[in-house]
Amino acid sequence: MFEAAGRPDMKMPDIKMAAENGKVATYHPGNNIIELDPKAYDVCLEMGKDSLNALAFIIGHELAHSFQTEVRTGNLSTNFLSYDRIFSVPTRIEKVADIQGVFTAYLAGFYMGNVVPKLLPRLYDAYHLTGKTFKGYPPLEERNLTAKEVLGINETLIDLYETANYLLVMEKNDIAIACYEYILKYYQGRELYNNLGTVYLLSAFDFFLPETDRFVHPVEIDASSQLTKIEKSRGVYELSPQERQFRNRLLEKSIEYFQQAISLDQNYTTARLNAACALNMLGKPKAALAFLEKGDLASKARSAPELGGKIAIIKGISHALLGDLDVADRSFEAAMRFDNQKISAQAGFNRNVLYSKPETILPEHCFNFPENFRMLMQDIPLGRVSQLEPMPLDENGKTFRRSKTGQTSTFSFGDMNGNIISIVRFKNNMVSSFDLLEMTSTLDRAFFYNLVSTPTGYYLKSKADGLVIQVDNKGKVMELARVFVHR
C-alpha cells in the first residue's frame, strides 16, 4: 500500500502489534509507527475472504495520517475510533484520512465496497461501543454515515480516475486535466502528476511537427497512455513561430509534471520514459538518451522485457532524430523481437517510417469496428443522466453527472452551455479476444492514430462509431465503452 500511495519521498512507517489499547489502530508521528490493536486484527480475521480488505482499510487510514503535514508537524497521535478534537485530530483530518486510505487501498488492489459497512459494526461490538455514548467516540450510526459518505466520494474518485483515460482516448484533454486536478484535492500520488504531464504532452500533438511526430512514441499514463493525437486536416502546412512556441511550452509543462512525479519516486519508470519521449518531441534527442541512462533503467529492463522494448523504441527515435539511421534501425529491430504484440507493432511501424520522407500532410485516420460489433454496441443507451444534479469539476464552470448500475458506469461532462461528452462504460461479456497484429496488418498508419497504449494492454477507439474497447496484453477485451460527443 505504501508503494501504491506513490509517496516514497516520505519514510514508510513501521507497523507493530500493540498491547490492547481500545483504539483499533493509531499513528505516532514522533517515531513514525502505526500500532495495530490485536483485537482489531482478530476482527479482521473473522471476516474470512474479506480479512485483508478489512485490514487494508484500517492500515490505509493510518498510513494516510502519516502523509498529513498537520499530523506530522503537530506531532498529533491519531485514534482510528475517535472523530473528535479531544483526541487531538479534527474530524476533517480523520475524514480525509478515510478518503485517502480507501483510494490508496484501491490502487493497491484491495476492494472496499461492502467491506467497511460490515467491518465497523464488528469493531464497535468488539470494543463494547455499540449503543453507547462516550465522549470523543461517535455513535456507530454517525460513523456509518461518515463511512457511507467516504465510500461514495471514493467510488466517484475511482470512476472519475478511470473515465479520465477515456477522455484522453477521445481527445478531450481539457476535461481530463480537470478530472485529475479534481482528484488531486483528495489524493496526491505520483501517477496523477505523471498523468497530468502526459495530457500536456498529448496536447502538443495538436501542433504536428513531421520530423518528430511521424514516429510512434511509447508514451504511457498509469492505466492508460496515448500514442499519438492528430485530428485536424490542415493540408500542407508548416507550424508558425507562435504555434511552435506554444507546442514547446506544452512539452516543457509536461516535463515539469514528470519531474514532479519522479521527485516522489526516483524509481518511477513510467514518468522517466515519458520525459524521454517529451525530450525527443522537443527536438532534444541527446537529452532524451541521457535521461534514459538515469534511474538504473537498463538493469530493470533485464528483468522486465516490456520495459526493455519501450526503451529500445525511444532510443531508436532518438538516434533517428540524430541522423544515426543504422543505429535506429537496429534499435527498432531489437524491439520487434520482444514477445509483446503492442511493442512489436509499434517498433515495426517506426522501422517502416525510418527511411520514408517526413509527411507534410496530416493523414486521415478513419477507423471502423466490424459491422456486427458496431450493431451490437449501438444498442447501448445513454440513459437519463441529465436528470441528475451536476457536480462542479473545476472553477471554470465544468461539471459532471454520474450514475452507476451494477457494472455499468455513466459519466456526462458539460459546462454552462450544456453537455460536452458522455461515456457509458461496462465490463465485457459480449466480445471475446482481439488480435492486434491482424488489425495492424490491414490498418497501417490509421490504426496507430486510434490505439492508446497502457502498461497492461491498450485501448482502441473508433471516433466514427463512438466506441472504445479496453484490451489486455493477451488480447482479452476487458471493458467496452460507448461515447456520445454532444459538441
Image (tube, rainbow, N blue to C red):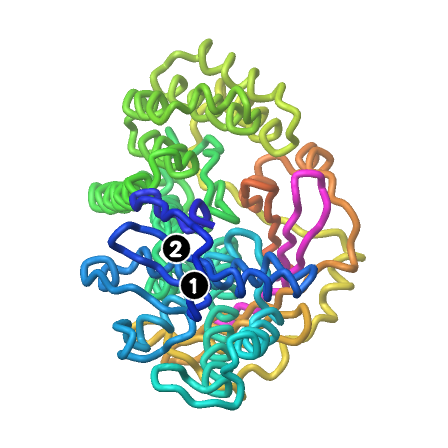
Q: Quadrant of residue 298?
A: top left
Q: Residues within 10 Å of mark 2 (few under 14, many from 20)?
A: many
Q: Tag 2's secondary structure?
A: strand
Answer yes or no: do the residues labelled 2 and 1 have beta carbons within 8 Å? yes
- Residue 434: horizontal and vertical position, in percent? 74, 44
Rendered residue at 34%/56% (across/down): 188
Q: Amino acid at mark 2?
A: Ile
Q: Which mark is residue 276?
A: none
Residue indicated by mark 2: 34
Residue 485 located within the stretch drawn in magenta: yes
> In the image, is 441 to the left or to the right of 28?
right
Q: What residue is disc 1 on?
A: 25
Three-letter residue code for mark 1: Ala
Query: Residue 86, can we see it?
Result: yes
Region rendered in magenta? 466-487
Query: Which of 261/142 is in front?
Result: 142
